[in-house]
Image (cartoon, grey):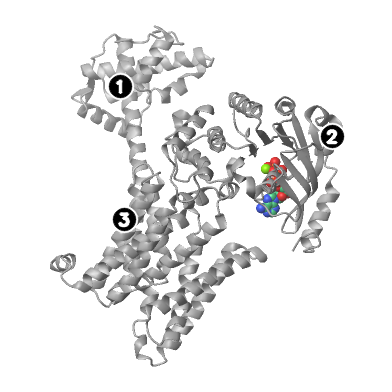
Amino acid sequence: MIQQVEDPAVEVHDLTVTYHKKPVLWDIDLTLPRGAIIGIIGPNGAGKSTLIKSMMNLIPHSSGYVRIFDSNIDEVRPQVSYVPQKESVDWDFPASVMDVVLMGRYARLGLFKRPRKADREVALDCLKKVGMEAYKSRQIAQLSGGQQQRVFLARALAQEAEIYFMDEPFAGVDAATEKAIIGLLREMSEKGKTVVVIHHDIQSALEYFNWIVLLNMRLVASGPTQETLIPSLLEETYGGKLTLLAEVGNLMHKKEFTGRDKR
Amino acid sequence: MGQLWEFLSFAEPNIRYVTFGSILLCSSAAVVGSFIFLKKKALVGDAVAHSVLPGVCLGFILAGNKNPILLIAGAFVTGWLSLVTIDYISARSKIKEDTAIGLILSVFFGIGILLLTYIQHSGNAAQSGLDHFLFGKAAAMVSDDVNIFGGMAFVLIIAVALLFKEFTLISFDVDFAKTIGFPVKGLELVLTTLTVFAIVAGIQAIGVVLMAAILITPAAAARFWTNNLRKMIFLAAAFGGFSGLAGAYISYIAPAMPTGPWIVMVISVIAFFSFFFAPQKGIVMKLISRRAMAHQIQEENVLKLLFQLGQEDKNYFQQRSVGDIQARRPFNTKLLLSALERLKKQGFLEKGDDRWQFTQAGQKKGARMVKLHRLWEVYLTRYLRIAPDHVHEDAETIEHIITPDLEAKLEKLLEYPVKDPHESDIPYL
Ligand SMILES: Nc1ncnc2c1ncn2[C@@H]1O[C@H](COP(=O)(O)OP(=O)(O)OP(=O)(O)O)[C@@H](O)[C@H]1O
Ligand SMILES: [Mg+2]
């Protein structure tokens, strides 16, 4: 069940991604609709983080290409926002909550310029939206996991982008925060923004997303939630049928197989 | 003392030069080094520092004398080469980065020593003093050197000030920096270039062997004192500058002594001091506050117990012996006695022939402790639905940290209960 859309927000064309010659994503080909809340679902190690990182060109592609709003990503960067997995940074870094949220304004500021008063106000506004304004001067080392997640979310909001890529924004947050966050995402989607979210809970996925991508090293499904979150497709995603694919991948790694690489 | 005064008065122009130069070099190295520290690249810094030696020697061989421009150029080339090689090896082979760093450091430094020995035996009279590049000799700097190296240091500080926001971002979250379209590769290149510059600028005063220490240690020490990046960098610069000053002084009073080790000694002492005594993060300060808390808990427990005994006997001001107290609760005798003595000093107890009794203030404080304990028990049973026989332990710890502010809130929330879950009276004053 792979459904393509007209005038997509994201177009991924025949994308293969390798780490040290070992493919972790095979021939992904999909399109994501504009203004939707899109869930990417799959088991651990399925390549979900890898997929959104390669959509933003953080990881080189072995073959294929990605286009966002029908442009090369580098032409639309100011409209793209990224919420990394919160484990990806060192939270012991000497910075305050406000400092981190202000980083969301850097794309607009450009090089050399310092944040202005207006930027601080936008940042404070975004902190309010995630319910963290009381923590604005707090050191980031003194936040709980859920609070860290909210700070990252506030930083993304401060970017005022058109499309948001979020790597497990619900990991380690309590039920009330999760509700607040999904409320925010819905608000954004109503304003026409596209939100791509990596998510682990299938139960809530039914309710949260209007488009689902099922992934396990290869694309299993991409389409409206009602048509994709069905037992047979979930079985295909989670049912460990892909041992063969994994084995071939390992072989390519061992033999330094270079056939797929562009260089 | 006379010497120190003479030194500080800068009577000799050469002292002025050397001192000013050392301070500038060390603080600029500390400023650039702060970002290396935050990026956790200390080892790379060390490798580059060692790798500039062959470049310096090659520069000398080419020029035939200690022309600073050629020495710097040589240092720059091999410093860079070492970095590129480390990156190449760890990206293209199975060798991990730390191994690659160790490998490059020893190979480049080995070649450097080889070249240095060759130059020393070549009979070139101009080579005297080239070995200072190993361990540094601040006093060997002449005014030209200071102008050039000091000028470089100055440029470094300006560059970091201009790119502060960008360097902070790539140290904290590189991926995010890439997604917003910052030229991350370019910025990393600039930061690395600045690092190589800082090392090259410092070789004459500090020497290649110990250069990494002056890059990293000031930042590591400063981190103990603050959580604010700007403050941290200013502090690192101050620590670095101070150790540079000390190095210049040593160079002045003991001309035969290399300065690098002394500079590193001073900065290490600062780092050790920070490690132990910095407020909040220092180990000693943590111990002290933990001890103070332990004392407070003991004292409050004694007061609480005396109040409970008084409540039972309907006589709060009865004199009680250590044995009376221990009969109720098995305090360690030594700890109990010292707590009693402290309470006497604080004016909560009085002592008459080895027996102890409340003062008015003591009775009041004892009542407050009992009240807090019982209020917390009520709170736990009512709001957390914990069984009455499970609340005592928890209340034993919480009672010591409830502030008067929380106390008032608790009383109001529970509407001034008169009995605790065990049917004991809650004393109000
Ligand atoms: N930097 C890396 N180098 C080598 N292999 C990697 C790297 N990052 C990820 N991988 C491998 O690529 C595969 C996909 O990883 P990825 O992080 O994209 O999975 P994921 O779906 O996000 O998993 P999770 O649910 O655990 O976050 C995994 O097998 C992982 O081991
Ligand atoms: Mg992931």
Query: Which residue is at the front of the view, A113 or A184?
Result: A113
Q: Who's the residue at 46% across and 67% down the image?
A: B196
Q: Nearer the viewer, residue B84 or B391?
A: B84
How much space separates mark 2 and mark 1, taking CA atoms? 68 Å
Q: Is residue B346 left or right of residue A122?
A: left
**Apparent side of residue B300 relative to residue B97 in the rendered image (left or right):** left
Same chain? Circles 2 and 1:
no
At horizontal 32% and vertical 17% (from top left) the residue drawn is: B368
Give the labeled residue for mark 1: B303
Q: Which residue is mark 2?
A: A233
Residue A67: image x %, image y %?
72, 46
Question: Which amino acid is tagged 2?
Answer: Leu
Q: Which quadrant of the figure has residue A155?
A: top right
Residue B64 placed where, x, y %? 40, 87
Compare residues A10 and B22 and report the one nearer the observer: A10
- Residue B39 is tagged as none
